[in-house]
Amino acid sequence: MWYQQRRRQQVICSLLLVVAGTVQASKVLIWPIDPTITNDQKATTLWIENHGTEPVLMQVRALGWLQADGNEGYQEQQHVIVSPPLVQVEPGKKQLVRLIKNTEPPAAQETAYRILVDEIPAPTEQANGAGIQFQMRYSIPLFVYGHGLNHSPNAAGNDQAQKAGSFNQPHLSWQLVQQQGKNLLQVTNHGKIHARLSDVRIQQGAKETKITDGLLGYVLANSTRRWPIEMTSSSPASALVMKVNEDREAKPYPLSTQ
């Protein structure tokens, strides 16, 4: 296994607004929101832009991203490093941050990371003491590809690539499960490439239960993810309708019988 020394997993809460390929909140703009490092690349870049009137100090970290038992976890690692890890961006300026592959990933595998960008309050704000200072956190997915793994930026939506078999694709199954009296949507990805799920609905006969109009979340390669849901109909579920990765239209996925 690539991660040989596991540290305490951290649960990260993120506040994001995704706008036209950027992450934006408050006065800071970050792009791209979907960086990758292919097998023939050594690094990729992230831009941080300050649209405010005061300098901003940002800390950037790369954490390993894991999914186990239907949940997510994050851990410290040294396979991708950030340079520089601490940046000050002046008003109206932008700063380049490099995400550097420090070790080669396993062949024919996709490895997932979360890039955490934390806005550090200015010392004068911290010293004010009257009330809690709100710290913005931006969480951006990074995928690194090993030799021999072809991935498509339009992973689930490139019909020609799928028919030709020239790209690896997510391979999804799903079912409804119960845990402590709550309904959970469980999605398993049997493929080598992650699946980003959005605009998700459950078909129940002639009705549909809306889960989300936007991003639901990710199911990493060879992983399972669960989300709590509320059913609006007692009819049996027959299909999960959703967009996967860059799909332009939602597609139905039949209920798993396993």
Image: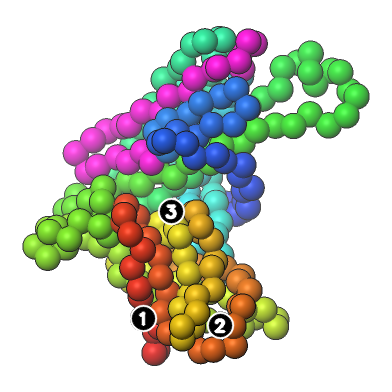
Specify whether residue 51 is painted magenta: yes
Quick check: marks 2 and 1 in contact, CB under 8 Å? no
Crowdedness of circle 3 by 10 Å Cα count: few (<14), some, many (20+)? few
**Closer to the camera in the image, 1 or 94:** 94
- Residue 208 falls left or right of residue 243: right
Q: Residue at x 55, y 39 (%)?
A: 17
Q: Residue at x 70, y 32 (%)?
A: 135
Residue mark closest to the camera, 2 vs 1: 1
- The reply to whether residue 112 is visible in this rendering is yes
Image: 36 above or below 28: below
Q: At label 2, which amino acid type do we have?
A: Val
The span picked out in magenta is 34-56
- Sequence-first tag of 3 and 1: 3
| Position in image of residue 162 (x %, y %) | 16, 63
Specify the farthest residue to the left.
164
Q: At label 3, which amino acid type do we have?
A: Tyr
**Closer to the camera in the image, 177 or 105:** 177
- Residue 97 falls left or right of residue 168: right
> Disc 1 marks which residue?
254
Quarter of the rendering containing residue 25: top right
Quarter of the rendering containing residue 136: top right
How far apart in space, not on screen, are marks 2 and 3 (Cα)? 30 Å
Marks counted in the figure total 3
Q: Quadrant of the C terminus?
A: bottom left
* Circle on res. 3: 3
Crowdedness of circle 1 by 10 Å Cα count: few (<14), some, many (20+)? some
| Position in image of residue 124 (x %, y %) | 79, 13
